[in-house]
Structures are given as structure tokens and as C-alpha cells.
Image (cartoon, rainbow, N blue to C red):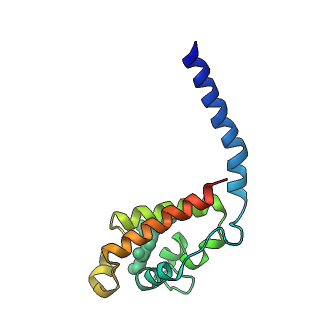
Amino acid sequence: MKSKTTLFALLAGLFLLAAFTLPEINSSVPEEGEFEIPENINAIFEKSCFGCHNSESDYQKAKDKMMIDKLGDLKKSKLVAKLNKIGKEVSEGEMPPEKFVAKYPDRVPTDAERQALVDWAKNAIKTLTKK
Ligand code: HEC
């Protein structure tokens, strides 16, 4: 039956993909030029996120979750997961947190800046996962 063959081929393909791609993604950090934070994106992080998510921050809870200036030291699988979370938290308006927004209204990213962060995270994931 044709559909069975197709299904089998699909499963075999997925298995191969998992077998060959995942270990590589999991076990290595990004190579030179594979992950970069451009100047304009870094400026948004600096304005809206570094107060908490930077290696020099005093906010341990936020640092434990993520240090944006150390993202490039993460293994690729972890990095991709963090980039996914950045996209999610920023587009859903969960980050920066409410209290920060209330206290520092001028440090809240604009809609355009949020969009720029989300687009950047998406593209960075694409670059990291293409083989
Ligand atoms: C006022 C401090 C503060 C600021 C500013 C802030 N965050 Fe956070 N962020 C936190 C804390 C605290 C957590 C952990 C929340 C928790 O676990 O409940 C967190 C969690 C996150 C997470 C989830 C990480 C994970 O692995 O679960 C992401 C992604 C994130 N922040 C991104 C951002 C981005 C992007 C910005 C800037 C646009 C930002 N944050 C600004 C304090 C901050």
C-alpha cells in the first residue's frame, strides 16, 4: 500500500534526522560567525534586558535563567531553546516584567523593537539549525 510506504519513508527520514542532526546540535557551541548579536539588537537588549539578564547584573534569579551576553557560550541546543523563549516572552509581552515596565517606562521596548527582537531570534534559530 502506497500510504504505508510513504509513512515508513517519513519515519525513517525522521529517525535519520534525529540520529545525525541532534547529537551535533546538542554537543557543540556555535562556530565563529554562526551566532551574533548585531549592534541594533544589542542596543535593545541593553536598554530593556541587561539590567537583569547580563553577567554583571545583581539579579541572581534572572541571571540563572539567562545571561544574554553569555548566550554564545551555550551549546547550540540550549541556545536554540533560549532564543525560542526570548521570542515567546517578548512577543507575548511577558518580558520585561510588569514591575520593571511600571518603574522604567522609558526602558520598555517599543512595538518595533519587540518585533526586531522576535525577528532576530527567529533568524538566529534558522542559522543555527540549518545543515
Ligand atoms: C527586572 C528584571 C528583568 C528584566 C528587565 C527582564 N527580565 Fe527576563 N526574566 C527575569 C526573571 C526574574 C526571570 C525568571 C522568571 C521566572 O522564572 O519566573 C526572567 C525570565 C526570562 C526568560 C525565560 C528564560 C527561561 O529559560 O525560562 C526570558 C526568555 C527572558 N526573561 C527574556 C527577557 C528579555 C528578552 C528581556 C528584555 C526585553 C527581559 N527578559 C527583561 C527578569 C527580568
Residue at the image point whose x is 36% and y is 64% from the top: 91
Most foreground residue, 97 or 121: 121
Q: Is residue 106 left or right of residue 41?
A: left
* Residue 13 position within the rendered picture, expressed as x and y whole percent measured from the top left: 65, 34
Most foreground residue, 37 or 67: 37
Residue at the image point whose x is 47% and y is 81% from the top: 40
Quadrant where the N terminus sits is top right
Q: Is residue 11 visible?
A: yes
* Residue 97 position within the rendered picture, expressed as x and y whole percent measured from the top left: 35, 74
Count of number-bearing discs? 0
Residue at the image point whose x is 40% and y is 65% from the top: 89
Q: Is residue 102 left or right of residue 63?
A: left
Q: Quadrant of ligand 1?
A: bottom left
Most foreground residue, 121 or 2: 2
* Residue 15 position within the rendered picture, expressed as x and y whole percent measured from the top left: 67, 36
Q: Residue 2's image quarter?
A: top right
As displayed, is residue 48 above or below residue 19?
Answer: below
Q: Is residue 29 left or right of residue 58?
A: right
As displayed, is residue 10 above or below residue 1?
Answer: below
**Residue furthest out toward the top:** 1
Q: Is residue 96 visible?
A: no
* Residue 106 position within the rendered picture, expressed as x and y whole percent measured from the top left: 30, 87
